[in-house]
Amino acid sequence: MTNEARSVRQRLKQIGLSDAAIDAAWPEWWSDSAEPSPSARLDLRFSLARKLGLDARSLVDDEGVPRFIWRDEARFKNLSGESDSERAAIASFGRAFGSVLSGAARVGQVALSADAIRIRNSILHSRPFVGLLDLLVLCWTAGIPVVHLRIFPLARKRMAAMTVRVGDRSVILLGKDSMYPAQIAFYLAHEIAHIALGHLSRETAIVDLEAAQLAIGGEDDEENEADRFALELLTGRADPRVLPVPGPYNAPALADAVLRSAGALQIEPGTLALCFGYSTGNWPVVNSAMQFIYASAKPVWIEVNKIALRELTVGQIPADTLPYLNSVLGGVAAA
């Protein structure tokens, strides 16, 4: 590693950026032979700054500390001790990557309604229930790119999802991992709610950190509204209570019950199981039931990002940014 590369990497790590984020943003054209060139060294720093959301001047100045551009324009939900610098890293990384996506996404063909039931009914005209795929189609049709991040700005990843505003467009970045689509569908519906309800009218981003449970009844009105909107969209009710029949419920029995009831209720079986957990608090049974509800377990992020790569106009992304996009999306572009 050259002195230039070592110095720049050290400065980026000092402000909390993860090795994975730095490696992803590092331009492929850089080599040891580029170090003697002042213009190459300058291009290296500008390239990293653009991808990571840094003030380029602060990275060019060897005497100063690199600064994130978007420090105070994001609101964070479910904070648990994240420092100012950690919040700035998350917000700036998300905003910078959102800019890449918005520049390559087609303009929306429909407007996103602020009425969850209206959206739900439009989907149910042609679908048996509202599932993750339906929400992804809704977003891309409305001109809202949705991707699942595989690389994060910090080593400690607690981001469940994030919605960023780029000009007059919104971008949704998912972070929560799951082997089954129902849980990710709720997080995506929650982010759709933030957009539809105008929660990003002032800030650059809303970051939803992972929470142990739904915020309904909590002190954050926006989170309550987003949760209720998401539940209405997915189930038809803002506070769906699924009461168990008398007697113990094990995972196979719960799976059988939701699979039999999903059609009549027009609720995706996995979502219906999550409603059971929300109603009873019996999350171990719900989590075990997922293996009986779905034919197979597979990382949800793969399908989310495959759809994203099909929807994005890759030709509009600068050539030196394409490898970065591919890395952050987990390599699905090459799969």
Image (cartoon, helix red, strand yellow):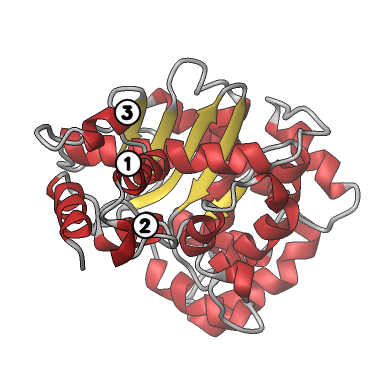
Amino acid under disc 1 = Leu
Residue 67 seen anywhere in this rendered image of the structure: yes
Task: Give the image location of residue 204, x and y in percent.
Answer: 44, 25
Q: Which residue is mark 1?
A: 42
Which callout, 3 or 2, points at the residue further toward the start of the chain? 2
Mark 2 crowdedness (10 Å alpha carbons): few <14, some 14-19, many ≥20: many
Q: CA distance from mark 1 to mark 3?
A: 18 Å
296, 90: nearer the viewer: 90
Q: Quick one: SS at disc 1? A: helix
Rendering coords of residue 49 (x, y %) = 35, 40
Query: In the rendered view of the protein, which quadrant contains the C terminus?
Result: bottom right
Q: Give the residue drawn at x 30%, y 53%.
A: 158
Nearer-N-terminus badge (1/2): 2
Q: Which image quarter: residue 181?
A: bottom right
Which residue is under mark 2?
26
In the image, residue 245 above or below residue 115 = below
Q: Residue at x 18, y 37 (%)?
A: 85
Which residue bears the numbered disc 3?
A: 69
Q: Give the left or right position of residue 122, taking residue 335 as reference.
A: right
In the picture, measured across the screen, residue 253 lies left or right of residue 56, that is right
Q: Residue at x 43, y 30 (%)?
A: 205
In the image, 249: left or right of 233? left
SS for dot 3 = loop
- Give the residue furthest to the left: 63
Amino acid on which the number 2 mark rests in the picture: Trp
